[in-house]
Amino acid sequence: MLNKVLIANRGEIAVRIMRACKELGISTVAVYSDADASALFVRYADEKYHIGPGPAKLSYLVMDKLIETALECGADGIHPGYGFLAENFTFAGMCAKNGIEFIGPPVGAMELMGSKIESKKSMIEAGVSVVPGVTEAIADHERAKDIAHEIGYPIMLKASAGGGGIGIQMVENEAQMEETLESIRRLALNSFGDDSVFIEKFIDDPRHIEYQIIGDKSGHIIHAYERECSVQRRHQKLVEETPSCALTPELREEIGEQAILAAKTAGYYNAGTCEFMFKDDRYYFLEMNTRLQVEHPITEAITGIDLAREQLRVASGLDLEYEQADIVPRGHAIECRINAEDPLAEFAPAPGKIVRYAEPSGPGIRIDSGVYAGFEIPPFYDSMIAKLIVWAEDRPRAIERTKRALWEFQISGVRHNIPFHTVVMNDDVFKSGTYDTSYIPRYGILDRVVEYVKEQKEQGGGAKTAAAMAGVSAFIAANQGNNQ
C-alpha cells in the first residue's frame, strides 16, 4: 500500500481523496496557493506545502514544483484529482521518472485517449461504435468544406486535445466554416497547446450517457454502469443521475461491454469514464476521460463501490476487490453541482465570501464540499461550492428528496445556482425523464429561474422559515436589477 500521497488539486476533490487515504492509513499532503491558504482541504491534510500565487498557471499547474514538493516530503504517490493536471500525460510521465506513482491510468493510455483523433482511430479498429466523421486533422477550410459536404451539414468541429466542453462548435453551413475553423484552432492552441481540429457529424439533441470503468494492473476491468449527464449548458454538466431513464436492460449491458472494450483497447487501468451520445436507441462512443469524474459519487451511491479507495488500491499494485457480477446497482441517485455562479447572467462565475453556510442532511443525503462559512471563493478556479448527492429507492423519491435537500441548503454572501436546481427538480419534463442535451434552452429553464426568484421575493419565502430561505434570499438580493 502507498504510504504518503500528495494531492495535486484543491477544493472538494482534495478533501474527498484525503478521506479515502485516511481510511486506508495513507498519510496525506496538501499543496496550496496563496488564494487557498485557509481552505478546508489544507486544514484537513496531514502536511501542507505552499506552491505559489493564486493563478493556477503559477501554482497548481507548475509540474516541476509539484514533483519537487513530492520528493521533498517523501510522497510515494500523487493523486491529480480532476481538472488541472489530471489528464496530462507529460505530468504522469514525470511522476514515473521520479519514482512516484501517478494515481491514474498508464501514460500510454492517457496519451492515446488525450487525442480525440487517435482514440477514435483505435476505437474504430476495435469495433467500438463511434460518431460518423473523419480521423484526420483538418489542414485548411477547403478540406473542411469537402468533408462537411460528404458527411452532410450540420457538422461539429472539435479540438483533438479538447476537454470540459472547450473547443467544440457546430457549423450549420459552408458560409460559417472558415471563420469557425480558425476560431476553434486558435482556442485549441491557446487552451491545449495543440491546434488539431477534426470533424464529426452533428447529432441533433442526443442524450449524453457515460460509463464508469475501473481496472487493475493485472488487466481485470469492470464497469459500474452509466450516468445520465444531459442537463448541460455550453457542453458542461449541471445535473447528473443514475441509472438513465433512456436505457433498456439489454442496451445497458451492451454499452457497458463497449466501455470495457474501449478501456482494454487503450491498455487502461485505474478509474476512467467512457462517454457516449445516445439517440433513437443508437449509441456512439465520444471519448474517454482518463480520470475520476466530478459526478462519481452517484455511481458510488448505487453500487456501494468507493471509487477513490479503489484508485488508491490499484495504484498500490493490488487487484480490484470486485468482479463484474458483484456490481448490482440499487436505487436511484442524483447529483446537483452547487456553483457560485449566476444563472440570471448566463451562469457567470460569482466568487466572493460565504457569509452563511449550512448543509442539508438526513437519509440518503451526501455533501462533498470544500468550503465553510467565512471562506472566500477565489476567482482563479472552478466556481463549485459543493456537490449535493441524493440517493433513494427509486427515481420519483430521489427527485422529491433532492427538492427537500435544496430547500434546506443555506448559502449567503455569494450568488449561487440553487434556484436553477429547484426549477429543474420541479419541472415535468425532467420528472418524465425524456430530456436531452437541448433541455435548458428548449424548455426555457433560465426564464423560469427568473420567474421563480421573483416569486420568492414577492412571497417573502412563503411558508419557509427565514433560516431555510437564507440562500435564496441572498440570491435574490444579489440579483436585483439583473433579472432579465
Image (cartoon, helix red, strand yellow):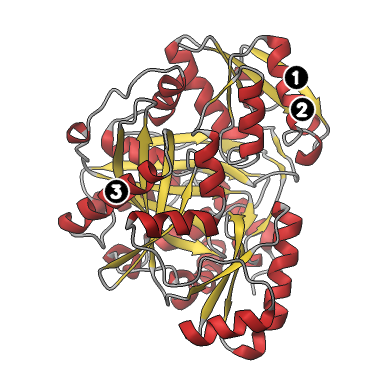
Q: Which mark is residue 208?
A: none
Query: Which residue is pictured at 33% across the width and 70% down the height?
Result: 429
Query: Which residue is pictured at 51% across the width and 65% down the height?
Result: 135
Q: Is residue 376 left or right of residue 331?
A: right
Q: Nearer the viewer, residue 204 or 419?
A: 204
Q: Position of residue 361 (x, y in %)?
A: 40, 34
Q: Nearer the viewer, residue 1 or 81?
A: 1
Q: Is residue 441 left or right of residue 402?
A: right
Quadrant occupied by the N terminus: top left
Identity, as a three-letter code, of the amino acid under mark 1: Glu
Report the label total.
3
Identity, as a three-letter code, of the amino acid under mark 3: Ala
Secondary structure beneath label 1:
helix
Q: Nearer the viewer, residue 118 or 462?
A: 118
Secondary structure beneath label 3:
helix
Image quadrant in which you'd find residue 84 = top right
Task: Examine the rendering and report whether any part of residue 56 can be seen.
Answer: yes
Q: Which mark is residue 64?
A: 2
Q: From the viewer's perspective, is residue 386 above or below residue 246?
A: above
Q: Position of residue 383 (x, y in %)?
A: 64, 47
Label 1 and label 2: CA atoms lie apart by 6 Å
Q: Position of residue 163 (x, y in %)?
A: 58, 54
Image quadrant in which you'd find residue 23 = top left
Identity, as a three-letter code, of the amino acid under mark 2: Asp
The residue that label 1 is drawn on is 68
Q: Which mark is residue 398?
A: 3
Q: From the viewer's perspective, is residue 74 above or below residue 345?
A: above
